[in-house]
Amino acid sequence: MTTIYISAAHGDDANAGTDPGHAWATLSPANSFAFKPGDALLLERGSIFSDQFLHISASGTPEEPICIGAYGDETRPFPAIHANGSGRWFQDYRAPIGGSPHRNRGEVSTALLLMDCSYIEVRDLEITNRRVDDSDGLVFNARNVMDRTGVAVIAQDGGTSRHVLLEGLYIHDVDGNVYDKHMANGGIYCMAHFPTDTRRITDSVARFDDLSIRDCTVRNVRRWGIAVGYTAYLNFIDRGGLNADGEWNNTFDYGDGSIDDSLIATFGSTNIVIEGNTVEDAGGDGITVMYCDRPIVRRNISRRAAKDIRSDIYNATENDRVAAAIWPWRCKNALFEYNEAYDTLNAEYGNGDGQAWDADFGDGTVYRNNYSSGNSGGSVMFCNEKAVNSHFYHNVAYHDRLGAIDIPRNPDADIHDNVFILDESCDPIRNDNDRADGTAHVQHNIFINDAPQERLINWHPHAAHIIWQDNLYVRFANRPSEES
């Protein structure tokens, strides 16, 4: 087992790098080093590595993981990697991954790239990836601005990537593309491609098992804060269509929204835990798990997500000008608990979402014991007809805006034993643009009108199918007819 040391202040790339007194000076030699199980790469605290990056493709073992982290005086700052647009690589899903405007291939700058890594642990680094000038001739919100990531984790040619841990990272100022949702574009993004040899698509499925992101801080990034699980294998999970030449044609059949257990276990990601992280000022969504089987998202905080999702910034296209705080996409039995979401932005400026929570095209989503406040688009959305078996209980919502409950076209939202404290800007049911056209069972909740005056509420908006049962209503001028 070898430990490599790198010190910007005291190192020299001509050194052996194998002890602190003979450290390397830059990250460059580490990008070509052949890491083996049990090896470690340690950067000296207080070091700043400007215009540099780390791109690693290596695996440890369960007994001897590869570790990347810090050494030196613990009173000094984390070692900092300031990529500034360096670390460019070409990302290619090798398949359609959804409709416009989602690109599936292109050049990306990533400060820390883990490609086909298993049994690898990364801790205690500071990472940025700023757009330091406009030498590309583009304004920051041009459609074709290069995607950037702080940390990208890719499964591609190695089958299942197992045991990837990102812990205690500080990632900020990643100036990526305003629009690209599913490229490596944001603070931390973990995704799976079809393999380079497309004949091996089903022989060696690229996916994640035992991936954890814990106690990280992500600030001022675009577009995503933390995202895990987007995959080219959505073409299998979502029954993608084929053209006459047998090629994927970017059409999908979600059926009734339910997700087969064996299908998601085979082609999705398993044993995913996102815990104890703080995401602030994400350009788009805060924290999202996608195509995961029973992921756990707990004790995270999102503040001021969706800062770029507004019509005066997100203006090269109107497609997918939506973002929420903490939510799943096409997951089976996703669990969200003890999370907090504050001040998700811009529902009044063109963000079609803006909620704290969003059960979106998933099967069995559970939100319990979470807290939300000040979110511009409301508390929770049950998004459309393919979000099924969704449950929202034991949560508290304080002064979210527009609507506490949002049920556009949803078939079966189950909402019980929550507390909704509503000011004058928030109705119990969000109904702007005739959104209240779904079905919900709302029981054993407490709805408190915290406005200066009692309010008269339309408890049964046109086209909604809501059962109100055994709820407590405080300071409203009326109640649902069945509860009067």
Image: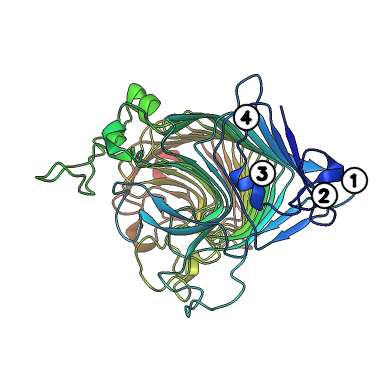
Residue at 36%, 68% in the rendered image:
318
- Determine which residue is flagged by label 1: 73
- Contact flag, marks 1 and 4 (Cβ < 8 Å): no
- Determine whether 387 is above or below 111 in the image: above
**If you read the primary sequence from the N terminus, does the residue marked by circle 1 or circle 4 appear first?**
4
> What is the C-alpha distance between the residues marked 4 and 2?
24 Å
Q: Residue furthest left?
A: 244
How many discs mark residues in the rendered view?
4
Find residue 36 and name its label: 4
**If you read the primary sequence from the N terminus, does the residue marked by circle 3 or circle 1 appear first?**
1
- Where residue 304 appears, x then y in whole percent? 61, 59
The type of residue carrying mark 3 is Asn
- Determine which residue is flagged by label 2: 45
- Contact flag, marks 1 and 2 (Cβ < 8 Å): yes
Specify whether residue 402 is in view. no
Find residue 277 and name its label: 3
The type of residue carrying mark 4 is Lys
Q: Crowdedness of circle 3 by 10 Å Cα count: few (<14), some, many (20+)?
A: many
